[in-house]
Image (cartoon, grey):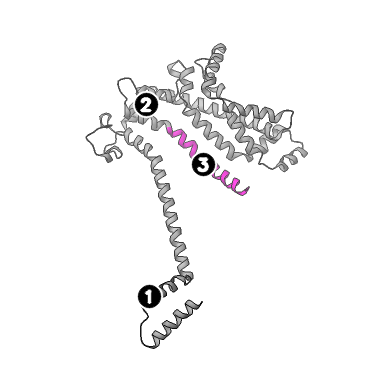
Amino acid sequence: MSIERNLTDKVTAMTKNGETPGATAETDAFDKKRPLTISQIRASTRNKKVLKRGGSYLFLLAGAITMVAPFLWMLTTSLKEPGAVFSFQKNWWEEWLPFSFHWENYVKAWHVVPFGRFYLNSIFVAVCVTAAQVLTSAMAAYSFARLNFPGRDKIFFGYLATMMVPGAVTMIPVFILLRYLGWIDTYKAMILPAAFTAYGTFMLRQFFLTLPKDLEDAAKIDGCSYFRIFWQIILPLSKPALATLTTFTFMGTWMSFMWPLIVMNTHEKFTLPIGLAYFQSLHGTNWTYLMAGSMMMILPILLVFIFNQRFFVEGIKLSGIKG
């Protein structure tokens, strides 16, 4: 306080004598100790928020470009001439922006191989596997989450332990079993082994545990059976979890390549991932047809994701409300 009083007295004396107080070390120290005004604090806070928000937008923009770039290259490649891909006589931006659109590449890619048949096979297998996994996972999850029976938790942990076994370990035993059953080169070999999943059971069980038991108790008082409670109460309340499992299962089955390649021998029963391999050979790859087929292949995945996106948002809201 004495330093501030001395500085104030000096400034007052210099002002009375008609002198202008200059910027000295003492006055600078006094100005630095002076508290900021409310407007200065608001301006500083506003600038920090702008910088923080701008950094977040730049980070998200870089991530979006990283994810969109492969799809953009795939789209532009599918519209080029066959000899225009990987040409060294073009500028770098010509690899990303096509100057001529050859839509006939899609028509040729559809007719060079039986693309329509491959499409139907993939749709049939993906729909069957998705429906089977969602149904069996939901029923198993309801049993482990809501029903009380001896050894329930031990059986669940044993079932959950199967997730630690890699698929490559069980591939040969499952193939031998299917050969003994006579299911090799049939749709059953692609559908039935994939109809059960421990991951889906675990995910739905965790969601079922968050549902209130009051509705279930009220339904039991009204005389509802376990199956009716499961079908009319549990499943309608579990749309976000069911939509998530449906999307993941459909995408995984749709993009599956190794297992259909192992169990299928007939050309007419191949799925799309195997069909796209026809555009590749030992002597070269027809990149325009391959990218055109890939674009047509990802359309169902995009449709499923867009349709289930609202359930994802609803699940996020519900999880946020529950704390």
Q: Position of residue 157 (x, y in %)?
A: 65, 29
Q: Residue type at mark 3?
A: Gln
Q: Which residue is mark 3?
A: 309
CA distance for labels 2 and 1? 83 Å
Q: Main secondary structure of the magenta part?
A: helix
- Sequence order check: which comes first, mark 3 or mark 1? 1
Q: Secondary structure at mark 1?
A: loop
Q: Which residue is mark 2?
A: 110
Q: Position of residue 148 (x, y in %)?
A: 74, 32
Q: Which residue is mark 1?
A: 24
**Residue 189 horizontal side relative to residue 152, left or right:** left
Q: Position of residue 307 (x, y in %)?
A: 51, 39
**Magenta-drawn segment:** 298-323
- Sequence order check: which comes first, mark 3 or mark 2? 2
Looking at the picture, tell me which residue is in the foreground, 76 or 232.
76
Tell me what residue is drawn at x 23 percent, y 33 percent. Answer: 88
Q: Secondary structure at mark 2?
A: helix
